[in-house]
Image (spheres, grey):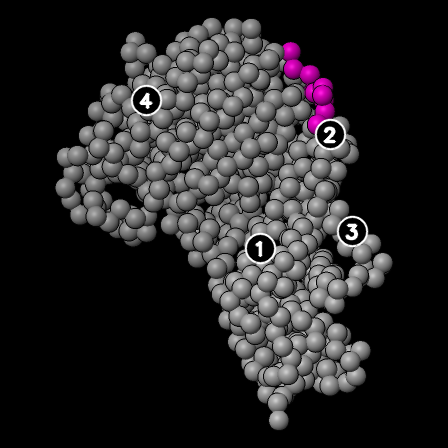
Amino acid sequence: MNSPSARAGAPSLGSVLPRFLVVAVIVLALAAGLGALSGFRRGLDEVDAQGYAELGFERGRHAALVAATDHGALGGAEAVWPWVLCALVLVASSSAVRGLLSPTALAARLADPLARLRFQVLWSVLFVAGSAYLAARTEPLLTAEWAWLGLLAAGCVVAIEVAGRMAREPARHATLAAAVGTLLPLALVLFEVDRRRVYRPTASDTLLANAGWLVAAGLSFVVLRAWASRGRPPLAARALVGLLATSVATPAVVRVLYPEPTSPAIGAKQPFNVVVIGIDTLRADHTDLVGDDRAGSNLAGSNLAGSSLARRDRTPALRALAARGSVFTNAITQSPWTMPAFASILTGKYPLEHGAVSLSGKLRARELTLAELLRETGRATAAFVSHDYVDHKHGFAQGFDEFDDSCAEGHATISSPRITDLALDFVARHAEQPFFLFTHYFDPHYEYKDHAEWSYADDYDGWLEKQLDFENLEANRHLMGAPELDYVRDLYDEEISFTDREIGRLVAEFERRGLFERTLFVVVADHGEEFMEHGNFGHTTTLHDELLNVPLVVVAPPSAGFAAPASVFEHVVETRQVFATVLAGIGVDFPPVAGGRSLFADGATPHPAYSMVWLPDALPKWGKRFQIASLRTERFKLVKDLTRGVTRLYDLEIDAGETRDASGAAPERRAELELALDAWIGEMQKRAGEVPLLEIDEATRTRLHELGYM
């Protein structure tokens, strides 16, 4: 006797394929539309978090909503199309699968206990294996997540069993059985949707995505059933399908409801382009930014003064640029590691004020960045970065129309040429309108590479050449003799020269296009690097000048009102003043912003520079749980280590290497500076708000570990 499944004929490919394609298009459209709606909701949250409504930043609101909606639509379609493609292949290649598209045939198959059991086993295996694979692409599943996965698989088996038993009832139950048997397992699979982690069943994004998939799957089945029976779906179903289908137009509707403003929200007196060239891990005494008549002036008093390193010409392109503007030889960064240092440059605030202070943290969304302000002046904005700590996950995409962090691939890559190429492409596309460009060059950061074009490190042939990873450097510091230290510094200089050449290539394009004379350039580093001057390699945990004194160059058109070309300033300044300097240079006066003084502000009163490394939440195994702050004047530096309870005063006039505590020789000066530093720390702690933390994926954590951060 033939089973019900045998009696049910499978439709031909010619009759099924057109119907399937229509359903596939509907599913893709609904997925894109639902993704767009979800993206629009996230865009509204972003606009609220960044305070664009209160600030009147219409261009920022437009950009945020359009980008979020577009990404949502693309993400929705991207999540569905592989499933649709797989289904298309199965439908085209298997008559058995084509039979599943017939409600009657499917009900018959589910009613057969043996066929139903096969279906349950096959589904469970595919469900668990497929889900585990998707999870493994990010990070291993936790025990609780495996339990949740098992519950979902069991739910699928139960749903298939219920559907099969219902299929033995009168014919009016056949359609319901088919729906439960096919759509409920699909909905359970799609319950996993979450881009940060696979299983978060109660997360709002997951619940919203699952509800959307249920609706889309249900409506698709209604349409398929109606098509198969040559009937028409119910009016309510058609209306709902139409309503959701129109959600595909959400990106266009958003552009109509929130159009790009025709006039800027913030006025700028000067139409200059603004280019901020950020260089990672570049200490001032390894650059050559002034002419031969002042050669080595940036090294005066340092332990490199008069050495071969001081005479080495590492940065000819930067020196040529600096000759057309101003060099600040005593520029002090606000933090000795990347994220808080660049956050201070781009917000004009101290680290505790902007909140980007934790190794597991990020920049607060509420902080107003230079990019957000310059976008509201009508400028196109773009950033091309090459370090995880300045990528979009860490909050640095705020205000940028274009933001590319694809070059942030860790210590093993050479990224400067790619950064320059991306920047040149942007300049070519926006040469006719004012723009703001932020380029971040990473290559001087550890691990240092040997470049064939430079021979600084060619004479070394020792043990370190084949073991140049950061962990080995730290573990074998006691074995580092003069040849090893010279080799590491020589490689570092090769990286600097390589990066200098790429910056020169970028500047040359401005000359070629006739853009140089209407562009304000800033070249600044986030921090320096230690080469055992105080017993350490790398950076992050001390506040000595090898980490804090960084190169700073400003080149602007004459109408900006800055200093004459080839000016050299030796007084102490802070790198966070770049923020106010750019705004002053283009003539922006925006009262809600309090970003400090311009580097060229009038006034004879010297201002101290403050810096901090504030890592109270660092894990003990990282060896970086410190709270240290410093105050730097023209002659003295006071460093207060709150973690160890140690305070030291350095007289830089007679001890540029910071080797002796001068507290006993100048007790009154120490008391005066300590009072000022304590007051500053107290003020920073009052202003410190939430320190936002980031869930770091395993790949990023590995890169940060290899770079010496974690």
Q: Which residues are magenta?
A: 259-269
Location of mark 3 (residue): 242
* Residue 182 in which image quadrant: bottom right
Give the mark nearest the N terminus, 1 or 2: 1
Q: Nearer the viewer, residue 687 or 698?
A: 698
In this rendering, the answer to whether 135 lies above or below 554 is: below
Q: Closer to the observer: label 1 or label 3?
A: 3
Q: Position of residue 416 (x, y in %)?
A: 38, 32
169, above or below 603, in the image: below
How far is the residue under mark 1 from the one under mark 2?
30 Å
> Which comes sooner in the sequence, label 1 or label 4?
1
Q: Nearer the viewer, mark 3 or mark 2?
A: 3
Q: Residue at x 41, y 18 (%)?
A: 509
Q: Residues within 10 Å of mark 3 (few under 14, many from 20)?
A: few
Let me know if residue 674 appears in the view: no
Amino acid carrying label 3: it is Gly
The answer for how far apart the CA atoms under marks 1 and 4 are is 50 Å
What's the mark number on residue 259?
2
Is 60 drawn above or below residue 626 in the view shown? above
Rate crowding at label 4 as few (under 14), some (14 to 19) or many (20 or more) other CA atoms within 10 Å.
many
Q: Residue at x 35, y 16 (%)?
A: 319
Dots 3, 2 in contact, CB < 8 A: no
- Give the number of the disc on residue 81: 1
Most extreme residue toward the bottom, as rendered?
A: 1
In the depicted view, which residue is nearer to us: 83 or 320? Answer: 83
Mark 4, residue position: 315
Dot 1 falls on a residue whose secondary structure is: helix
Q: What's the distance in space between the residues labelled 4 and 2, CA to CA?
A: 45 Å
Mark 3 / mark 4, whichever is N-terminal:
3
Q: Earlier in the sequence, mark 1 or mark 3?
A: 1
Under mark 4, the amino acid is: Thr
Give the side of residue 193 with respect to residue 591, left or right. left
